[in-house]
Every structure is written in C-alpha cells, then in structure tokens.
Amino acid sequence: MNTAKQRKASLPERGFAWAAAFLLALFLVASLFSLLAVQVMTSAGLHTGTATNDSVLDGQMKIIHNYIGVLADAYGFEAETVRQSVSRDELRDFNLNAAAWWTGVLAEGESRTIPRWYSPAMEQAIRNAVDSAGTGEDPNVILAEITEKIDRTVYPLRESLLTTGLDFVNKRADIPGIVRSLRQVPPLCLVLCILAAGLIALLAAREVFSSLKYYGTALAGAGLVLAAAGIIYAVMQLKAMLSQASANLADEFGTMMHTLFLEAGGAAAVLLLAGFACLFIYRNRFEKHMAPGEEQAA
C-alpha cells in the first residue's frame, strides 16, 4: 500500500499539472491564432489565391461590364466590343500585381506606387467604338473613366486612402518591424507549448500514464476554443456587413476567410480527435490496471 501511494502524484503536483494543462491549451490557441494572423498579413499565397479566385474574378468582370454598359448609354457607343476587350487573363494578372503590391507594402513598410490598369486592346476598342458611333465624344475621357473603375474594383479602397493611411501609419510605427515581430509569435508559442507539455510530464512522472488526462484535456480544450471562434465568426456575418460598403470587398474577404476557416477547422478537428484519443486511452487502458484504492483516490 505504501508503494502504491509512493507511485501516486501528490495533491500539489496534480494542481500544478492542471495549471500546466491550462497553459498548454492557452499557448496552443495563441500559436494557432497568431499563425492565422501572420498568414493574413504576409502570405503571398493566400492573397494570390484570393485575387485569382474564380468567384472574385467573376464578380469583378460583372461590375466592369455593367459600368461599361452605363457609359455606353451615356456616351452613345457600342458596349459589347469594349466589354470583349477587357480580358479575363489581363484582369487576373492585374489582381496578381495588386496582391504582390499589398504583401510588399507589409514587408517593406513603403506604400510605393499602386499598380494601375492599362490595356492597349481596350484603348483601341474604345476609340473604334467612339469613331463608329460618330458622337464626337473624347475617347480619352471614356478610357479614363473605365480605367478608374477597374482600379477601384481591384482596389475596393481608394488609392488615396491606401497611400495616405499607410504613410500616416509609417510615420508613427515601424510596419516591417511589427510584421517581423508578429512572425516570431507562433514559434515562441510553440516553444511554450513544449515547455508546458514537459512540465506536465515532469509533474506526472510518478504515474506516467496519468499525464494523458492532462494532455487530452489541453488538446480538446484548445480545439473547443477554435470551434467556438468559428461559430462566433459565422454568427457575426462579417461578409454581409462588408457587402453594405463594397460587394467586391465582401467577396474577397469571404474568399480569404473561407480558406482560413477550412484551415482552422482542420486544426480544431485534429486537436479534438487527439484530445479525446488521449482521454479515451487514459480511461480505458490506464484505469483498468489501477488498484481499487488508487482508483478511488484518483
């Protein structure tokens, strides 16, 4: 009986082990959320995938074509030839340049010059359409209006707001330094997770298999927090709120968040499965081999 008691962790060791399990769950959640934040801020792949998404391009093409139709009614030229001159491939490349500009701004901290739309084919189509209509309108004016519309469609926020806002922030904060510091958060949280897990193993050294209940609780708890965050995001309907300001911005936001939502959902599922697996093994394997007195004490 004395040997059994010696193999059991003391009450303070159990208390500290539960505290370490709480810290492990906290650091797991922090590492995953910070990793998602870093991806939003600096991932060229995420922004490129969003910019070239078919639904985003379809929405942009629809906005541009509708605007060309409005101008055609106002200036009296044939809209279809101008619409056909706006190439989907060119718009895709323009979106890629916009994504590269944004990630470059965050990496370098300089607003630089925003890429502008230019299409010789569209320019020629506008001139031909105006000449065929014979209305005497200046094709340069129409070209400028369509170009500005395409720029504003790809950049839902106006260029002046982007450049002015970034310049204002850059004077008061080191954006590249902040981004570099943010990139260090996930590895730091991972190290803290390892330390918390090691502390649990050390505190439960007398009964090694009992550490599974601490690990299982921490993993499952972190998974539940991620799942709760996903539910809160779905209930808030941020995309619907953004669509009131800009439908195109809402589409891009929705596409990006869909990717992040799938990644976070996969991480939550892995954590929940791993946590419940640890708890299942603990309950069904370890406790079967416990002495009756030990089982009551546990």
Image (cartoon, helix red, strand yellow):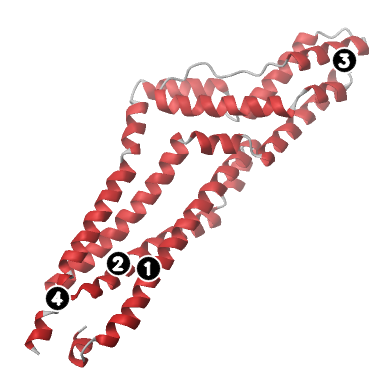
Q: CA distance from mark 3 to mark 1?
A: 66 Å
Q: Between marks 1 and 2, how big is the CA–CA gap? A: 7 Å
| Residue placed under numbered mark 4 in the picture | 9
Q: Amino acid at mark 3?
A: Ala
Say which element carries label 4: loop
Q: Earlier in the sequence, mark 1 or mark 2?
A: 2
Mark 3 secondary-structure assignment:
helix
Comparing labels 3 and 1, the label whose residue is closer to the camera:
1
Closer to the chain start, of discs 1 and 4, is 4
Indicate the amino acid at tag 1: Gly
Q: Amino acid at mark 4?
A: Ala
The percent position of residue 286, horizontal first and vertical second, equals 28, 81
* Location of residue 76 by image quarter: top right
Do labels 2 and 3 touch, CB within 8 Å? no
Query: Residue 15: x, y in percent?
Result: 17, 70
Name the one closer to the observer, 73 or 44.
44
Single out the mark in the foreground, 4 or 3: 4
Q: On the image, numbered disc 2 is attached to which residue? A: 215
Among the two numbered marks 2 and 3 on one chain, the one whose residue lies closer to the N terminus: 3
Give the residue drawn at x 35%, y 77%: 281
Task: State the separation of the CA atoms marked 1 and 4.
Answer: 22 Å
Residue 77 picture location, percent across and down: 88, 18
Q: Earlier in the sequence, mark 2 or mark 4?
A: 4
Mark 2 Cα within 10 Å, few/some/many (few <14, many 20+)? many
